[in-house]
Image (tube, rainbow, N blue to C red):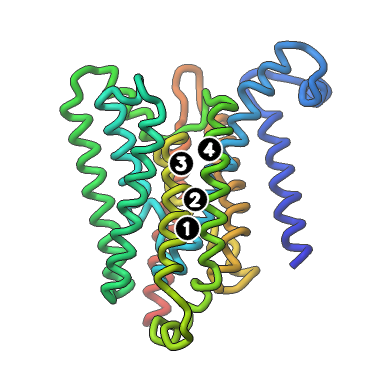
Amino acid sequence: MIRFWGSLLMLLSALLVLSLALGAYQMPPCNWLAALIGQGDPVDRAVLWHIRLPRSMLAVLVGAGLGASGAALQGLLRNPLADPAVVGISSSASFMAALAIYTGLATTQPASIFIGAMLGAGFAAVFLLALSYAKASATSLILGGVALSALATSFTALLMNISPNPWALSEIAYWLMGSVADRSFADVVLLAPLVLMGILLLMRGARGLDVLTLGEETAAVSGFPLVHTGRWVVLGTMLCVGGGVAVAGAVGFVGLAAPHLVRPFLGHQPGRLILPSALVGGMLLLVADMVSRGLSGPGTPLYLGVVTALLGAPLFLILVFKSQKERV
């Protein structure tokens, strides 16, 4: 276990260093190392501290929140295909944030994007929790989440369709594709407490998620308060996903992939997967951001959400086919 955690932390550190070294502005290794400790050329320091470092830190934070939320949701819904994007949480958060942009509140009250995204994420999470308490099957939960995602996406498309001016339309469209570019340490300071608090709340429900793997009836007989577990997961997901969507836009499939990458090493106890999935989620989004930077051309940026969708959609199909084979 110590070796596993050490490997994760070393890999995350290596990816962070690599992300700081990559970019359109070329810096020799000695230059960016000097800039990292506050020395060297002022331009190098500005690029490293005001552009690359906030971008990399936000990628890790957003990915960590999505990875931890995905692990908790898969445990709560007892379905390995559960993911904040697949079950409509990210889409609902995106719609409420897009509504803030459409109404102009995002310009006059920047906090409205955060508030809207968290309210949207919280509504979707409560909806799924209600389905779970109504004894819906795993398939029904996923289908309900997909329906909610389609509804939120339709409302978002409606906002874009009736947008009063091209600026608002382009602002919503580009924001929905997801990105951590052009962010600052102010965004890091704003997002970090939300993600950290969200992960702590998810960890509060870790024991209940482990008990839930035995089945709802067995868990109820054991006397464990499963209602509290659901509340912790709902609140934690709301903070992690809502905050991440508000800063980076719609980024999908990280919450689906991270737990599946960790599960072969730690087993199938959801509570044990939350923290490792957070680290792996941060690494996945960091790698996706580096791919986005590497493939972007002058004036034609490749957005982060596009990269994660291209990588995550095939994984989702593989998991669907795998689950079908296991049933047969």
Amino acid type assigned to the residue bearing label 1 in the image: Gly
Q: Residue 276's spot in the image, x, y percent?
A: 62, 59
Dot 1: element: helix
- State the residue in front, 250 or 207: 207
- Proximity of marks 2 and 1: CB atoms separated by less than 8 Å: yes
The image quadrant that residue 132 belongs to is bottom left
**Between discs 3 and 2, the one toward the N terminus:** 2
Are there few (<14), some (14-19), or many (20+) residues within 10 Å of tag 3? many
183 or 267, which lies in front?
A: 183
Residue at horizontal 40%, vertical 62%? 82
Asked whether disc 3 touches disc 2, contact meaning CB atoms under 8 Å apart, the reply is: no
The CA distance from mark 4 to mark 3 is: 6 Å
Foreground: disc 1 or disc 4: 4
First reached walking from the N terminus: tag 4 or tag 3: 4
Q: Secondary structure at mark 4?
A: helix
Question: At label 4, which amino acid type do we have?
Answer: Leu
Which three-letter amino acid code belongs to the residue tagged 2? Leu
- Residue 290 found in image quarter: top right
Q: Mark 4 and mark 3 in contact? Answer it, CB < 8 Å.
A: yes
- Expressed as whole percent of the image width and height from the top left, the position of residue 52 reads 63, 26
Residue placed under numbered mark 3 in the picture:
243
- Residue behind mark 4: 191
In front: label 4 or label 2: 4
Q: In the rendering, at what x and y percent does residue 36 appear?
A: 77, 26
Tell me the element at label 3. helix
**Which circle marks residue 218 in the picture?**
none
Per the image, the residue denoted by label 1 is: 70
Please say if 180 is above or below 276. Answer: above
- Which residue position is annotated with label 2? 66
